[in-house]
Image: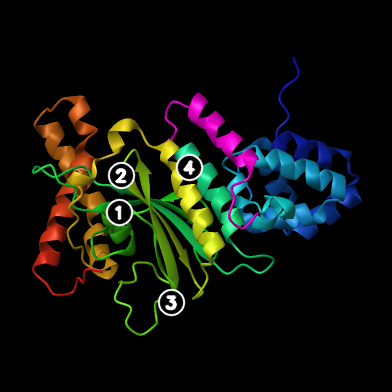
Amino acid sequence: MNEELTWRRYLHEIVRRKSAAEKKQLYTAVQVTRAAFQRWRSGENTPDAAHISLLLQALPGEERERLQSLMLDDPKVRPLLPIEMILPSEDRAPDKIPQQVYEEVLRIARDTPDRFWLLCSTILFRAISQIETYPKQTGVEICVARCMPPRPDGKIRSLRVYAGQGTPPWRRDLHIKDGFLGAESLAGYAVIHRHGMMVPDRNATGMVVPVWREHENSCAAYPILREGCIAGALIVSCCAPDFFTQEKLTLIENYADLIRLAFYDHEFYPASSIDLGLMPPWQIQRQFFCSFRQRVNEAYKHSLREERPLQDLAQVEARVRESLEGELLQLASQSDEGAIV
């Protein structure tokens, strides 16, 4: 049986067929050394977004299209591809998710046991491909916020900003994020009232929603709902004011509906459980999160000294995060810095 063709194997074939002069010309165009190419081909390393763009530009049409197609099949490389190469222009309907996206997402949801990250990677990447502007990018970031586990009283007091992906000035890869959002936030408001919200311009007179992302000048948030229960919110931030047209808002709502497939049944909470408190501004939260990893390590060591069961150790990070949530809720309740939307 022939080994499956990957973009790395195909790149190896492309380079192998070239003469010494053509290889040198290719390395120069991509602005890397022969050794760097070899590491890409062997799997030892992966090119960054800038070098992928240069590589695709340097190849003739047929080779470029084939390599790009194979890169799209690699979930680790796909987010690094130039956004304008992802969907044909005819598939970029302003308010509709293309059929092939639904097919891809449903297939992942069916076949992948631990599906959250793979589904997030696919859905956020596709959403950015449609929401972002072409050919000059405006700069958008999409984040998934999840309901924190209920407190001892059974109430959910905050949303955890969990994962994000964007275009410059934000990170292009899907990555874990830190931070809590409460009733003062746009996402919190969307979750409490169970409908989408949008701020067209952060600098407009009368706007009281606090900025929680650097570079953010407009934003939108939609709750992640199923059968009246809530799992969190989908948040889109943009560098430009007045970015969100009605078509874009409809599209974001559609992606919020789609991303609910990444959540399990127990992660949806009844509306009666939602009782969001206030959270301090992110500038203050950041000071607490600076010591988060140290606190986790200390908690692990304490658990080991106490000889607690191994399955308990796996929950240490979650317990530290819940403790941090409580501290921040208390801090916000003691100050006048939070403002409910």
The residue indicated by pointer 1 is: 191
Whole-percent x, y for residue 259 in the image? 45, 43
Amino acid under label 3?
A: Asp
Q: CA distance from mark 1 to mark 2?
A: 7 Å
Q: How is the image coloured?
A: rainbow
State the residue at coordinates (21%, 68%). Answer: 340
Q: CA distance from mark 4 to mark 2?
A: 14 Å
Q: CA distance from mark 2 to mark 3?
A: 27 Å
Q: Earlier in the sequence, mark 2 or mark 3?
A: 3
Whole-percent x, y for residue 244 in the image? 51, 67
User: How many residues crowd around disc 3 within 10 Å: few (fewer than 14), some, or many (20 or more)?
Assistant: some
Amino acid under label 1?
A: Val
Q: CA distance from mark 3 to mark 4?
A: 27 Å
Whole-percent x, y for residue 124 in the image? 51, 49
The residue indicated by pointer 4 is: 258
Q: Secondary structure at mark 2?
A: strand
Q: Earlier in the sequence, mark 4 or mark 1?
A: 1
The residue indicated by pointer 3 is: 201
Label at residue 230: 2
